[in-house]
Amino acid sequence: MAKGANQKLKLAYIAKLFYEQTDDLHSVTMQDILDYLSKLDIKAERKSIYSDIDSLREYGMDIIGEQKNKTYYYHVGNRKFEIAELKLLVDSVQASKFITLKKSNELIKKIESMASIHEADQLQRQVCVSRRIKTMNESIYYNVDKIHEAISKNCKVRFKYFQWNLNKEMELKKEGAYYSISPWYLTYDDENYYMLGYDSEAGIAKHYRVDKMLSIDCVDEKREGEEEFAGFDIAEYSKMVFGMFDGEVQNVKIEFDDSLVGVVIDRFGKSVHINKSKDGNFFVNVPVVISPQFFGWLLALGSKARILEPKAVRSRLKDFISDLAEVYDD
């Protein structure tokens, strides 16, 4: 490369230097800047650097200059993301079961690039994804994007759907035939991504695990099921459904010990109406999808929670407990 070939990129490289190598604890001097540019075959004088710094400030970079012992030290102050916010993003990527290990590491590397090289070390020390349970479908990252595209274009999607067999192999459902579904919502529940859509063949709304979809693509057919999802509230739906298990929606009256008020608010939201009953107890009336997952959640609370109404649901819970007891009847 000819000497000075990077000259027109001088301002961009100075900005790169500040973003990559400076933060509140690490600064550069004017000589550091000149040495950095020299290694890139960029000629510069101190006067021009002062002008460049002023231009970057006008552009919006928060470049702070501080004098110490007759020497000026420069560093970037405010950034788009603070280090605490970047740590939060890293933790979120780590905790997301639906993101594969490979994609998790790729995303964390990109998050690191938004910090200085010194702060990036702090983020790297937080990377502990290798032993966490992660999805094994590498395409999920693009599946989500394709579903969003279909919703935006008001068209259907088609995909193949699989389940795991005893040999830990993907086994296609419907003998490998494509599903054709009208997607309406994406939701995150129980550490997994789900697509809520309308199955026109069955005439009902269904949900599908996004990480179990293969060969997904948009179809040049208008979505159906608009009436089914008219007035649909995804937040309320998430409160009703336990573990995304299908079932009949019913209003259930449940009594809880007062010590479980936090558990109830965590599950049904702060807007849930709490009614005081007898001493040390309260009850709520909530719509829930009646399923084994709902019963399991309730039983995990032990004797401090019980269904009051309707009687039919109480009976189903009793049958559920009896069937479970038989499994352990030696």
Image: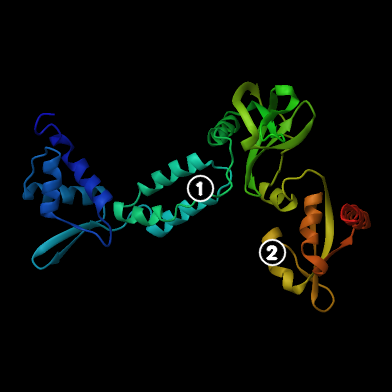
Q: Earlier in the sequence, mark 2 or mark 1?
A: 1
The answer to whether 49 is drawn above or below residue 7 in the figure is below
Q: Is residue 180 left or right of residue 70?
A: right
Mark 2 is surrounded, within 10 Å at the Cα level, by few (under 14), some (14 to 19) or many (20 or more) other residues, namely some
Residue 314 on image: x %, y %: 90, 58
Residue at horizontal 8%, vertical 43%? 44
Q: Do we see residue 178 in this rendering?
A: yes
The residue where tag 1 is placed is 130
Q: Is residue 71 left or right of residue 206?
A: left
Residue 124 on image: x %, y %: 39, 52
Q: Is residue 170 left or right of residue 101?
A: right
Residue at horizontal 17%, vertical 50%? 53
The amino acid beneath tag 2 is: Ile
Q: Secondary structure at mark 1?
A: loop
Residue 265: which disc? 2
Residue 212 on image: x %, y %: 65, 35
Residue 329 on image: x %, y %: 91, 56
Colour treatment of the image: rainbow
Q: Is residue 263 left or right of residue 92?
A: right
Foreground pick, 162 / 89: 162
Q: Secondary structure at mark 2?
A: helix
Circle nearer the viewer, 2 or 1: 1
Mark 1 is surrounded, within 10 Å at the Cα level, by few (under 14), some (14 to 19) or many (20 or more) other residues, namely few
Residue at horizontal 69%, vertical 23%? 178
The amino acid beneath tag 1 is: Ser
How many tags in the picture? 2
Q: Do we see residue 289 in this rendering?
A: no
Q: Furthest residue to the front?
A: 330
Distance Cα–Cα, label 2 vs label 1: 33 Å
